[in-house]
Amino acid sequence: MKRYFLSEDDIPRQWYNILADLPNKPRPMLNPQTHQPMTAEDLFPIFCEECAKQEVNTTDAWIDIPEPVRELYKYYRSTPLVRAYGLEKSLGTPAHIYFKNESVSPIGSHKLNSALAQAYYAKQQGIQSITTETGAGQWGAALSYAANVFGLDAAVYQVKISYNQKPYRRSIMQTFGAQVTPSPSMSTRAGKNIINKNPNCQGSLGTAISEAIELCRTTDNCRYTLGSVMNHVSLHQTIIGLEAEKQMEMAGEYPDVIIACFGGGSNFGGIAFPFMRHNFIGERKTRFVAAEPESCPKLTKGVFQYDFGDEAGYTPLLPMLTLGHEFMPANIHAGGLRYHGAGAIASQLMQDGLMEAVDIQQIETFDAAMLFARTEGIIPAPESAHAIAATIREAKECIETGEERVILFNLTGHGLIDMAAYEQYLSGSLHNYATTEEDIHKFTDTLEKLI
């Protein structure tokens, strides 16, 4: 195993805004009532003003990282780029496999990169409290930590199935002082409506987003934050790919394929977007592959349409590949990937053929996770296991072709608080879940056709 690190001086000072360089820019988000494009000012009641401005910025390719945020990044960045010799040897592949290890952050995932930025902007604006949703709990843990760092109150709605499956992530959030509520709950109108419709509902990211936004709207001096989907979140995550560019240069190689798991798109965009800019101008021909669950296949089987980002319809209408905002994913252990839609940028990239996607069954992801743990010594989060499974598929193709392909994937988080899922796998009680065309049509045929 060989690791590559950057010095403090080499840690990026700017994030990369892919919106400025996209060949085809995504359609704008729309006001649900008027169907008119929304401005940054329209978003001010929900998001911090600086985040709202970043969200709609399509002209500036480089945006300065505030120095207080960069100083906090230095606590754990640069994260290592690692050559996975053990995995390569086990597979017998001629491929060279690298991974960017974001699991070394204080809360164990890439999510802190945006949480620190969003909490900082809230503090600078004089906001007193922030609210959010979380699936598996990685984003909730990151936001809770960042809120504590900047002296903010934090309220987190955690998807109920993950709240029960992953009690220690809940404890981490509470350790940092956050209020954690299982979603759907009886504390909001959106939650009550969902429970009245389905008393046994185990929740989704869409339901938790609805509750978090409702709390934001009904609480003075409060703003909503989120860990994926939106443009400004992917912007903050590009520090991953920008570091990886420099580290791959140190390794003397350049990736032929870049792979990341995909829920809403933040970690995929974080590692992929900086490399994509070289494809846009013809310098490189790197392939970009998003790995999603077969049970929540918005990229591979969703429809491209305007849809809400939440179940209750509180968000603007977003141009996305979607399974429908009322779609309820199966209760897989990769809670961070149980989201019905893809962010606007990734959706446009898929439409333009500039990225690829694969959907993977749950048991295959845990097969991959076990092999990775036994060859590289790191137990990955179930979300990251999707990227590992897709990497193994690529590496096995190289065995057949004899191609010495360079593969880079993003290890977004560790699985040390996901051992209940591994226990189910080891006992043979883990199951695959598939989404049928009938399931998808049920929730997408009713969407208003605006594209």
Image: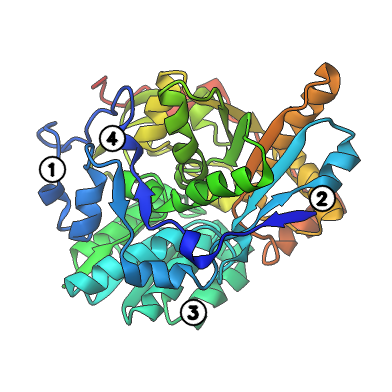
Q: Secondary structure at mark 1?
A: loop
At which x and y percent is residue 361? Answer: 69, 35
Q: CA distance from mark 4 to mark 3?
A: 39 Å
How crowded pointer 4 is (Cα within 10 Å; few <14, some 14-19, many 20+) is rated as some
- Answer with mark 4 or mark 3, whichever residue precedes in sequence: 4
Residue 62 seen by the camera: yes
Q: Secondary structure at mark 3?
A: helix
Residue name at image x 81 percent, y 17 percent: 401
Residue 236 is marked as none
Q: Amino acid at mark 1?
A: Thr
- Answer with mark 2 or mark 3, whichever residue precedes in sequence: 3
Q: Is residue 36 above or below residue 187?
A: above
Between 148 and 182, the one lying in front of the other is: 148
Q: Secondary structure at mark 2?
A: helix
The quadrant where residue 421 appears: bottom right
Q: Amino acid at mark 2?
A: Met
Q: CA distance from mark 1 to mark 3?
A: 35 Å
Residue 370 is marked as 2
Do the residues bearing badges 1 and 2 touch, measured as CB atoms within 8 Å?
no
Q: Which residue is mark 4?
A: 20
Depth-wise, is mark 2 or mark 3 nearer the camera?
A: 2
Q: Amino acid at mark 4?
A: Ala
How crowded pointer 3 is (Cα within 10 Å; few <14, some 14-19, many 20+) is rated as some
Residue 39 is marked as 1
Q: Amino acid at mark 3?
A: Gln
At which x and y percent is residue 168? Answer: 61, 72
Between 250 and 438, the one lying in front of the other is: 250
Q: Which residue is mark 3?
A: 174
